[in-house]
Image (spheres, grey):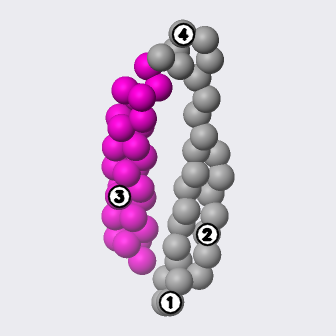
Amino acid sequence: DTIVVEPAGEGSRITYTAEIKLKGLRRVAEPLLKPMLAKTADEGMAGLKATLDREG
């Protein structure tokens, strides 16, 4: 995982990158898991943004 924090105007931009590699038979499920994992990541980032905005 990589987290990058950069200045952006009067605030900051946070970029989070995760690379998940499945092995063996699990790779078959990868196309099904990608949308789920993307949704989870989006929800996590929304929660982080809400917390940071609330804290100032």
Range shown magenta: 29-56
Specify whether residue 40 is in view: no
Image coordinates of residue 19 in percent, x first then y, are 60, 40
Image coordinates of residue 48 in percent, x first then y, are 42, 58
Residue 24 is covered by the magenta coloring: no
How far, Cα to Cα, is label 3 from label 1? 19 Å
Q: Amino acid at mark 3?
A: Ala
Q: Quadrant of residue 56?
A: bottom left
* Residue projecting furthest to the top: 25
Which is more toward the observer, 53 or 25? 25
Residue underneath mark 1:
9
Q: Is residue 34 above or below residue 26?
A: below
Q: Earlier in the sequence, mark 4 or mark 2?
A: 2
What label sits on residue 46 in the rendered view? 3
Q: Amino acid at mark 4?
A: Leu
Residue underneath mark 4:
25
Element under disc 2:
strand
How far, Cα to Cα, is label 2 from label 1? 13 Å
Element under disc 3:
helix
How far, Cα to Cα, is label 1 from label 4? 46 Å
Element under disc 1:
loop
Which is more toward the observer, 18 or 55? 18
What label sits on residue 5 in the rendered view? 2
Neighbours of disc 2 within 10 Å: few (<14), some (14-19), many (20+):
few
Q: Amino acid at mark 1?
A: Gly
